[in-house]
Amino acid sequence: MDTLVKLQGVSKIYPRVHKPRERLKAFKALLFGREPEQGARVLHDIDLEVVRGQSLGIIGENGAGKSTLLKVLTGVIKPTRGTVETHARIAALLELGAGFQPDFSGIDNVRMQASLLGLSGKELDERLDDILEFADIGDYIDEPVKHYSSGMVVRLGFAIVTACRPELLITDEVLAVGDESFQKKCIRWIERFLKQGGTLLLVSHSMYVVQKLCQKAMWVHDGTVRQYGDVFPVTQAYLAWHEKRSAKEKELRIQAQGDGAFYNIRQLSIEGFAQGEEPVIAMGQDMLAELVIYAPDDRAPVGVFGIVRADGTPVYGVVSDNEGARPHGIGDRLYRFRFRFDAIDLLPGSYSLRGHSMDPEGVRVFDSREVAFRVAGNTKEVGYVRLAHEWLD
Amino acid sequence: MRKDNNRLDGVFFKNLVIRQIRQDYLENVTGFAWLILQPLILLAVYAFVFSTIFKSRIPESGDIGFVPYLAVAFWPWTAFSESILRASGSVIGNAALIGKVAFATEQLPLAMVTATFVMHLIGYLAVLIFLQLTGTHIHWLFLTAAVPVFLLLWVFAASITLFTSSLQVFIRDVAQILPPLITFWFFTTPILYSTAHLPALVRSIANWNPMAWFVAQLRQLLLFGEVRLDITALAVVLFIAVFAWLSLRFFRRFAGHFEDFL
């Protein structure tokens, strides 16, 4: 396999350099090849190999180290530890309008950037029309770049990259600035670029874009690789993690009354999985659940099963007495409901199964409990559930 | 197949120099005129102070007056000192570029030095013509021999700049320390005076100053039409070559860490 980029054990620490004394200290450390004593550890021990023809999406929350990783990859900064090898003609769009001189006209900046990317004057003359056509900013090309909108800057920047035909294209979330039609144009271009054997490294917060363009994904978290692999499992795990986190932030977690409740829940479980193991259901599989309620007055209580997304959004819920279902008494004033979701059509992601206990009249909820589970699968559908559908002529 | 994305690149470097020249001299109306006027005014001031007030005489100059003697050395010095002072801030000044675009960053100070040299050489030619018209005989043929001297001076300035511009990223005080050092260097270099004015002991120390050699060379070539290739010339070339190699290594060693400090 033809390796274009190889990172081994890469760490990056940004030294603290706010005060002159700190600068001097950091410089001394640098001079003697020591690691800075104080600083922000942005990347920690990252290994990565990108082979020709691969398309890799780098995902992660803000501040996870994605941009620093790209900077190390492109050779813009040196890692504190580890090695970086590159064997390709790289074109990188690391930041909006990076390298553009605001006082100069668009066309002057095109010349500058193109030569920076290794295009000779003759090559540029041949491709200039293509660049202008791709950027599609009309007469603005003769205006100083400082008068451009951010969208126009991105258009011009990307147009130059398309003209220099790199082997490896690296972009850092800059395309998101462009408008809808320009984004589509870029995506079409990247797809063609990949088809022709190009290699892509993309940082994006749009899982849609990552799933559309990339075969592989790398989830960077706190400067380390949290997960690496095929794009679907990694992006799904990342989204699920996000949902869980926002649920925590919103404190949407249900309050379980627990043992103090009159009709309290003794057990809620998904069958077929051991205690402590996260249940994983393949999309389209059946899911069996069990709810055991303790009724002190030994009257059969009403039970509720429901499914919520990891962030607490309800997906579906059903109450036993509305459908004429009754629990089995299993002795000791315990009542058990068993329940099956047939061929569960939830889209991949993290969910929770919720169980509620109600009084025998079904008037109020006494107790609640939930069990997290994950639905796995490869699909490009969006939303929570698959609805029965058919494409018509 | 190994392709280095951080290589020195001819087309980009040329564009960088042109951009610098446009930015500094051609974007404002007086820029270009100022380039000729400023040293001319300075020269006039020095000429007035030294030849009229102090009645300075140059012992070995013969029939060549003080003004041509000063002018031939003054322009190269201006190119040298100004390029160092300006280019030392070129890494910090381009913070927006560093850490965002992959390129060989040493091109920034080198382009600034080159732009300054190109513009001052144009001024130098204008001054030489002015001197010729006002009755000084300039040995124009020896201008070709002066070209390698200028190239060497460029290498010297560029080497110093590679060192100062990278150091300034880490130690900002360089910006404050440099101007007085350059002024000191100016007065210890025989530009306003001749080494013949100096006591023997001081002269032997002053001879270690590479700039003294440059100044003497240019005067010999352009005013007296003499080429002097001796052991000193060889020593200067060797010294500058080693210095250039060291400063480029110094710069590259730290280039990947500029962004940490900017």
Image: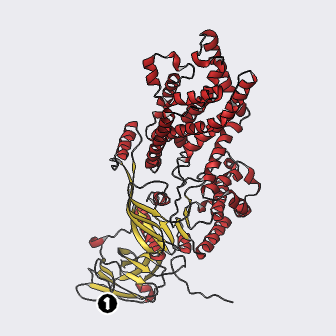
Provide the residue designation for mark 1.
A328
Answer above or below: position of A174 versus A277. above
Q: How many labels does the image show?
A: 1
Residue at 41% of width from left, 86% of height from top?
A321
Answer above or below: position of B137 versus B240. above
Q: Nearer the viewer, residue B11 or A63?
A: B11
> What residue occupies the far left of the structure in this picture?
A332
The quadrant in which residue B228 appears is top right
A275 to the left or right of A136? left
Q: Indicate the colouring scheme.
A: secondary structure
Q: Can residue B257 be seen in this view?
A: no
Q: Which amino acid does label 1 sit on?
A: His
B146 to the left or right of A81? right
Q: Is residue B151 visible?
A: yes
Residue count near mark 1 (Cα–Cα under 10 Å), binned few <14, some 14–19, many ≥20:
few
Horizontal and vertical percent for residue A307?
43, 78
Secondary structure under the numbered disc 1 in the rendered image: strand
A134 to the left or right of A12? right
Quarter of the image for the C terminus of chain A: give it. Answer: bottom right
Horizontal and vertical percent for residue B37?
70, 26
Q: Which of A87 and A257 is in front in this view?
A: A87
Residue at 53% of width from left, 45% of height from top?
B95
Horizontal and vertical percent for residue B53?
62, 9
Q: Which of A365 and A338 is in front in this view?
A: A338
The quadrant in which residue A296 appears is bottom left
Residue at 54% of width from left, 22% of height from top?
B190
Answer above or below: position of B150 versus A337. above
Q: Mark 1 lies on which chain?
A: A
Horizontal and vertical percent for residue A267?
29, 80
